Amino acid sequence: MDGDERWSVDLGFVDVSAGREFYGWELRQHLQVDVFGKCGELKCGQSHHDLKCYSTVLRPNYKFYLAFENNLCEDYITEKVWLPLHYGLVPVVYGGARYAHFLPPHSYVDATYLTPLQLARLLSSVGSSPKLYGLYHLWRKYWKVLLTPPLCELCLKLHLKTSNNKEALQGQTYGTFRRGGGELTTARPTTHRTIIPDSPNLKPRRSFKG
């Protein structure tokens, strides 16, 4: 990008998190980014975590959500990723998690190894092309995100009648267990988010958890 050129395609929504302010600030030098929340100039109802914010403000007006986690942890994925996926946006992730292990292929943009300028170019290119942007939503033909409270995960584990059920209930922070259909899941004491197929002829390869 030369001189003062700046892409003005309305692409971004960001919740600026601790440790990510500089990256977000640098990105805004190249791309139109709207910042909501206590660190931004825009508000979305009482809280930008309100589900109404996603359904009435974000989904109709934005294509991407900058889902920058507070901590760089291998298995740390929060609602910053799951909620945008659920409400039809493409999350732009920046963290230490193994995103390919938790999320469907080509459902997100990983900015971990991109400079702000490189990310701006990518988002501008994808966001201005219906064909390219549509590729990030192909997975929705076969899968959907289910958001359930933590107690529902506990109930699920209590009702699993498998040989690995005991291991799943031992309170391990991380691990794996298999369910009746044989699909591999990650056992974590956090909110259970499962991506399931819409088509009855397709079996899920795994449950994705956050």
Image (cartoon, helix red, strand yellow):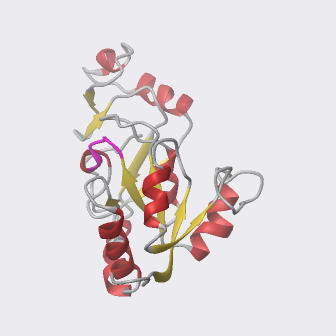
Q: Is residue 152 visible?
A: yes
Q: Is residue 1 above or below residue 143?
A: below
The foreground one among 3 and 75 is 3
Quarter assignment of residue 140: bottom left
Q: Is residue 52 left or right of residue 208?
A: right
Q: Which residues are magenta?
A: 95-99
User: Image quadrant of residue 101?
Assistant: top left
Percent across and percent down for residue 127 are 41, 79
- Rendered position, 103 above or below 5: above
Residue at 41 percent across and 46 percent down: it is 194
Residue depicted at x 35% and y 58% = 197
Left or right relative to 112: residue 91: right
In reply to whether residue 90 is colored magenta, the answer given is no
| Residue at (68, 50) in percent of width and height | 38
Of all residues, the one furthest to the front in this rendering is 3
**Residue 157 spot, x, y in % from top left:** 41, 26
Q: Position of residue 107 (x, y in %)?
A: 34, 63
Observer-nearest of 121 and 168: 121
Vertical relation: 5 (above or below) 18: below
Magenta stretch: dominant SS? loop
